[in-house]
């Protein structure tokens, strides 16, 4: 049983709720730092992908989970970031500069895509962002002079302050550092007035406005930051893949990204990384299972998509808070042990079912 | 000295409906001014016009002598006007504390980059916001609910949280749309005390819409009765309650006629 006694406001303002949390995060940090020695090259590469997807998850979580604006076109921002980085680094731009351009260009695109959000939300916004996703996909395919079209574009190494990032381990540390920085940035915003304004807009636009929140400004800002983070992830993704082609940034990819934050747990920063880990791990898991199934089933083309879909439906029905919900319950169980009682979360569930993303 | 809020010949049409049809009144600094009237009289519409959610089809609104019609909705709170809603509009999936802190939004002075880095300036501002909000929590006795999600709270508590959020803004003028609707007798009694405290101790001027006549007579300095968008009567609570046109509007003309007639 753990009691958290609050003795100063700083406990609510700070990043950690109590000493125990500080300890666990320190442990996680150590684990992540020694990962290159503990893991094989293959698993380290998966961890890199989790970092990259996690950054996308943060961006999408800020927009959809915290501001309540659904985007079905986030793969497009990933694409804008990836291609910008690929094109500029091929021209010999230093990594920090080309990455800054990737972020800024994605942000600018985000601001334009966010324009419809000033008028519509819900399903209409989903359609508008979906259309944008198609447009970007088309541009990446047709603008061959820059993107190489369907024949693709290869991506060089990262040059950072005279240091060439080579090998999975170095690239892993770079991705990890950026993922941590992005997480801190998002957490900082969420505990400051800007983050509260996002949540206010999500829950009631009319009273957000009456509390002095400029709807158009904050919605645009949310799109800009979300797209910027996704663009940053896109730049890393380009170096991870080493070869870009338009079919990596399709609308289907957008849907997968949205699913990632839903499964991870909408409205939580943890959820972004839980979701990323899930999206990366599931295909591996499926391929293990598929090997054990009769050939006709195991090699069926739609197996992965089907399992993804089923898992998503199961989460929405039974655990709307996603993986974060599981984790939260486990933590509460340990904190309250031995006083946990069944049905403790029942009321919470009732409201989540109503309209969390109205 | 001119009044805190002046409303002049205000008119609002929704298609063919004249929800507000030439309403004028002024609210003096430091008073509780109440709008009464049957459902559909246009009271909430007057509130929505003052908080600039709607733009009137005619008329003028001045706050501290400044033309409010030139001010966008998100600027009204900054001038010192905070409000509650008839059908509670809280941030449902956030804690009570979070809701009250959003009330401090108009006092945000830190830049975006500072918030991203959570610089010491941001931390200081957060502490100051929290201290202000804690005073509201103490006043309204919300301590037990501080960390609860609004969505799980009973109706009566939400009503108080919404009042608290408006107070957290630190307004000069507080607009309360039916503060006692849905409350039981005891909760209504608390609400009456708070409204008096808000006027007497915090020095905040209150403009409210209210149906509970005992609450109205208890706390109001002046009352304005409306029906079908028009002003029926204005004066002290007793004067307005005994006004012939007001009685007829509430009872319906035939009932008034049966009761003795004009
Ligand atoms: N947004 C709107 N669109 C159309 N008609 C409206 C709108 N808001 C209010 N009305 C109409 O204006 C009239 C007054 O409504 P309201 O101000 O809510 O009354 P009250 O608060 O006094 O009960 C009603 O007839 C209502 O139907
Ligand atoms: Mg009303």
Image: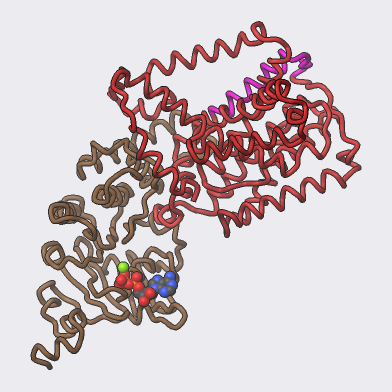
Chain colours: A red, B brown
Q: Is residue A335 visible?
A: yes
> Can you say which quadrant of the picture contains the N terminus of chain A?
top left
| Side of B155 relative to A95 (left or right) | left
Q: Residue at x 36, y 50 (%)?
A: B90
Q: Which residue sits furthest top?
A: A37
Q: Please state the total of marks drawn on the protein image.
A: 0
Q: Residue at x 71, y 24 (%)?
A: A293
Q: Quadrant of residue A14?
A: top left
Determine whether B203 is above or below A15 in the image. Answer: below
Determine whether B178 is above or below A166 in the image. Answer: below
Q: Residue at x 49, y 17 (%)?
A: A25
Residue A46 on image: x %, y %: 69, 20
Determine whether A176 is above or below A263 in the image. Answer: above
Q: Which residues are magenta?
A: A161-184
| Side of B110 relative to A17 (left or right) | right
Q: Which of A81 and A40 lies nearest the eye of the viewer?
A: A40
Q: Is residue A165 magenta?
A: yes
Q: Is residue A237 magenta?
A: no
Determine whether A123 is above or below A177 in the image. Answer: below
| Side of A258 relative to B32 (left or right) | right
Q: Which of B215 and B78 lies nearest the eye of the viewer?
A: B215
Q: Which residue sits furthest bottom?
A: B262
Q: Is residue B83 visible?
A: no
| Side of A23 relative to A343 (left or right) | right
Residue A342 on image: x %, y %: 33, 29
């Amino acid at each position: 049983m753990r009691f958290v006694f609050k003795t100063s406001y700083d406990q609510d303002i700070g990043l950690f709720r109590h000493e125990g949390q500080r300890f666990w995060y320190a442990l996680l940090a150590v684990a992540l730092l020694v990962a290159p020695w503990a893991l094989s090259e293959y698993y380290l590469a998966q961890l890199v992908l989790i970092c990259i997807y996690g950054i996308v998850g943060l961006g999408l979580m800020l927009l959809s989970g915290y501001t309540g604006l659904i985007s079905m076109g986030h793969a497009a921002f990933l694409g804008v970031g990836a291609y910008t980085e690929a094109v500029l680094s091929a021209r010999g731009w230093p990594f920090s500069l080309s990455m800054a351009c990737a972020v800024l260009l994605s942000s600018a695109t985000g601001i334009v895509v966010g324009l419809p959000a000033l008028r519509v939300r819900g399903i209409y916004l989903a359609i508008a962002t979906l259309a944008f996703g198609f447009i970007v996909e088309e541009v990446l395919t047709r603008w061959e002079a820059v993107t190489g079209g369907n024949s693709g574009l290869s991506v060089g190494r990262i040059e950072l302050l005279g240091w060439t990032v080579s090998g999975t381990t170095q690239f892993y540390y770079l991705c990890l550092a950026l993922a941590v920085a992005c997480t801190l940035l998002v957490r900082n915003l969420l505990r400051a007035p800007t983050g509260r304004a996002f949540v206010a807009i999500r829950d009631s636009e009319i009273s957000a406005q009456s509390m002095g929140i400029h709807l158009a400004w904050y919605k645009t800002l949310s799109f800009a930051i979300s797209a910027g983070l996704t663009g940053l992830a896109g730049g890393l993704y380009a170096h991870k893949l080493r070869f870009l082609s338009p079919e990596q940034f399709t609308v289907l990819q957008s849907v997968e990204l949205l699913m990632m934050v839903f499964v991870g747990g909408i409205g939580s920063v943890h959820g972004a990384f839980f979701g990323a880990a899930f999206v990366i791990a599931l295909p591996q898991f499926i391929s293990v299972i598929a090997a054990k199934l009769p050939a006709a089933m195991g090699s069926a083309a739609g197996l992965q998509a089907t399992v993804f879909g089923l898992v998503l439906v199961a989460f929405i029905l039974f655990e709307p808070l996603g993986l974060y919900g599981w984790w939260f319950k486990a933590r509460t169980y340990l904190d309250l042990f031995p006083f946990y009682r069944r049905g403790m979360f029942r009321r919470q569930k009732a409201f989540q079912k109503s309209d969390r993303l109205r | 000295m001119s009044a805190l809020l002046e409303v002049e010949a205000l008119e609002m049409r929704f298609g063919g409906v004249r929800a507000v049809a030439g309403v004028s009144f002024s609210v003096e600094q430091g008073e509780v001014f109440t709008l009464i009237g049957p459902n559909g009289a246009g009271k909430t519409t007057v509130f929505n016009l003052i908080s600039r959610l709607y733009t009137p089809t005619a008329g003028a609104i001045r706050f501290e002598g400044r033309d409010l019609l030139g001010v966008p909705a998100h600027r009204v709170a900054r001038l010192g006007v905070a409000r509650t809603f008839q059908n509670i509009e809280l941030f449902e999936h956030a804690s009570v504390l979070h809701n009250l802190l959003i009330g401090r939004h108009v006092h945000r002075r830190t830049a975006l980059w500072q918030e991203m880095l959570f610089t010491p300036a941001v931390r200081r501002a957060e502490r100051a916001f929290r201290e202000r909000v804690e005073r509201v929590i103490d006043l309204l006795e919300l301590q037990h609910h501080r960390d609860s999600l609004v969505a799980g709270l009973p109706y009566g508590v939400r009503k108080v949280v919404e009042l608290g959020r408006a107070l957290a803004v630190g307004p000069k003028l507080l607009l309360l749309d039916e503060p006692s609707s849905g409350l039981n007798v005891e909760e209504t009694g608390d609400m009456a005390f708070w409204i008096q405290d808000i006027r007497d101790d915090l020095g905040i001027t209150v403009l409210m819409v209210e149906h509970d006549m005992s609450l109205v007579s208890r706390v109001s300095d002046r009352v304005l009765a409306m029906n079908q968008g028009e002003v029926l009567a204005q004066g002290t609570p007793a004067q307005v309650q005994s006004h012939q046109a007001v009685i007829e509007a509430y009872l319906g003309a035939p009932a008034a006629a049966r009761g003795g007639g004009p």
